[in-house]
Amino acid sequence: MGNEPTTGAALPADSAAADADAPLGGGGSPGEPLLEVRGLVKHFPIHGGFPIRRRMGAVRAVDGVDLSIAAGTSFGLVGESGCGKSTTGRLVTRLLEPTGGSIHYRGTDITHASRRELAPIRSQIQMIFQDPYSSLNPRQTVGTIVGGPMEINGINPPGGRERRVRELLETVGLSPEHYNRFPHEFSGGQRQRIGVARALALDPRLIVADEPVSALDVSIQAQVVNLLQRLQRELGIAFLFIAHDLAVVRHFSQRVAVMYLGKIVEVADRDALYRRPRHPYTHALLSAVPQADALADAEHPRRERIRLAGDVPSPIDPPSGCRFRTRCWKAEELCARQEPPLVVRDGSDPNHLTACHFPEPPTTLGRDVILDPALAAAEGVTGPGTGPGPGAEAAPDATRKAR
Amino acid sequence: MTTSRPPTSPAETDPGDPFLSVRDLGVRFSTEDGVVRAVDGLSFELRRGQTLGIVGESGSGKSVTMLTVLGLHEPRTTEVTGQIRLDGQELVGAGERTLQRLRGNTMAMIFQDPLTSLSPYHTVGRQIAEPYIKHTGASRRQARARAIEMLDKVGIPRAGTRVDDYPHQFSGGMRQRAVIAMALVCNPDLLIADEPTTALDVTVQAQILDLLADLQQEFGSAIVLITHDLGVVADVADDLLVMYAGRAVERGPAAEVLRSPQHPYTWGLLESVPRLTGDVDQPLAPIPGAPPSLLDPPPGCPFHPRCAHRQRVPGDACATERPELPVGRGAACHLSLEQRRTHVIEHRQPGLG
């Protein structure tokens, strides 16, 4: 991805208006921002009370997200369940109405656009859903499903819709003869291909793929990932790729953002994020991914091992200041008082933004941080936070099980 | 095996007979469409204090195998052949009372979905205490104390008050911890974990897997870990069994299988998964096609319709002759050892060492 600062660069929310002109020069043709999201907020109100129902509070699902996706590139959004990544995807496609912030598609503000205003844009932003079983109507044939978007938009391609649908089926690796079959006749992987064909029917410029492979078997996942990647390269479609699997996101996206409790905590180009992460949460996420090649030996120094305590706090009443501070081993008083802005930290690449007051050293090797009380007790580690900080490669390996 | 045992001393490893021994297990279900051969000729062994990882895709028979060990299959429509010996005791054909005495006591299971494996009507503490009362004859008060002790051990904060909570008051990770506490309450010698972390987020998954490994060191249980994720196996398993279409296709020490896999299906699994390190410009190498129907499994090697290496085997052995899985380390494949070794060296992933 080189050094195009516009490629999915995100600015801190509060400074977005002020220095929008500062580092964002115009890139080349692939650097033209297709989608610009600034300070996006979605709060779901909670109603309750008796006898008069009133608003009790709100689930702050998305709370100030900035991102921009360049044409023809893939932007990955990772995070654990409940972090707001799917809500972000639904806001971008305007399946949900944002509470605040702005969404610009090719310069047009679509934040609160009406159905009629959205109609021409909807055909350019399509979605692929997670569950290939519930996202296809069981009463419709494949032809009707894939042709549906064209029918709704009144598009009559040369040669007729049926011919176009058969072409699309071939594009996604299905047989054109499947036109008259029903979804139940297909396996999970094939169904997901039908969903992809439907998303392609209107020649979109942006596809929001929400966990497109997580419901599939391991050997089938790779088929669908390869298909999406081929489409991205050959048709030049931009992707907002939402997933919880860090390895799949890394494989698919040139730029990756990590979300935690409704906010982006770190965003960077792929290599920077995976090799030189700065946010403690990114470190924790990466170290938690089980790897088939994790068997450390002399040539391959072992990855760091970070075990957080407890679960993600409730988005109804998120922690003050930095939202990760309740599970962070570096949290100090400042973290509770002041929310860290999403900015470039010392020692990071120029378009690597981290929202942390005390960023980690840019490496993923070495040390252990065990915060989970049960684990710490079982392994005889005294107290939480045994990470000796930078230069931890030489740390004693006492807590590691002999293997 | 007596019904009440004092808490066992940690890891009394017995180098003699395996604790769990499965020989030539076959499980067939009669369905409307015909007979499903869910498991076919499966054999493996497991010693105390060891962890066996069973890897396979959905429908490979890995869960059915372990449900059969526990005797949780539907007896009217299921035909079980072969041997399952737990600590010398034969379980195939054992009576329901024998099995009830063993279940929850000598052998326990952790299911995939912690929400559906807990009853919403009873408190967490009561559900943990139930098998303890049943198997040890402890009083309610003792059992409650034991439930608090177990909750504390699996890392539930303020276990003394959380013991009276209902499952919906727990988060996903805490529920899975409660299910683990329930499984471990009678110090089982055999713990079967069926995809115990699939429903969890990665940071919680890592906590749970480490916790299982630590508790195993403390209690010395034998663990069978069923998963589709080779990474999980690399983290915790001593031995590894790869299943495909109801049969074991490869087995051996986990580190060895992952370092130098010998079966084309294992190659496929390892090469189709993206990694945190490794080349991103290289497309993934998926396994073509889809797993076969077990109503009518392919003749010969069950993997041959999807296998890219079939042409390298002389004749049509792959389609006609069923390859044997050697005892100990090995793979059920017609390729010669030399051919397999060459493949492993050529396709070695950076970092697989």
Image (cartoon, grey):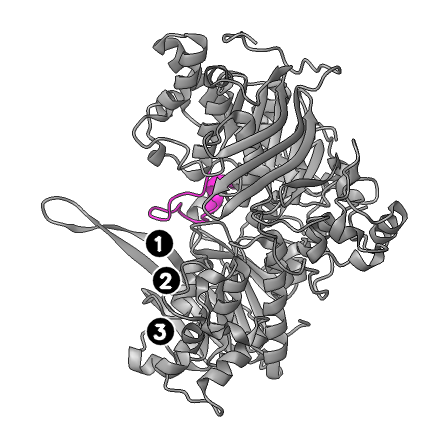
**Looking at the image, which residue sits at the far left?**
A51
Residue corresponding to mark 3? A111
Residue corresponding to mark 2? A41
Residue B40 position in % (x across, y down): 64, 38
Find numbered disc 3 in the image and state the secondary structure of the residue it sits on. Answer: loop
Residue located at (59% from left, 22% from top) = B190
Q: Amino acid at mark 1?
A: Arg
Q: Is residue B252 left or right of residue A117?
A: right
**Looking at the image, which residue sits at the far right?**
B338
Q: Nearer the viewer, residue A268 or B250?
A: B250
Dot 2 or dot 1: first in sequence order is: 2
Residue A160 position in % (x across, y down): 46, 89
Please say if the residues under marks 2 and 1 sit with CB atoms less than 8 Å apart.
yes
Residue located at (79% from left, 43% from top) = B259
| Range shown magenta | A311-335
Q: Amino acid at mark 2?
A: Val
Q: Nearer the viewer, residue A59 or A292?
A: A292
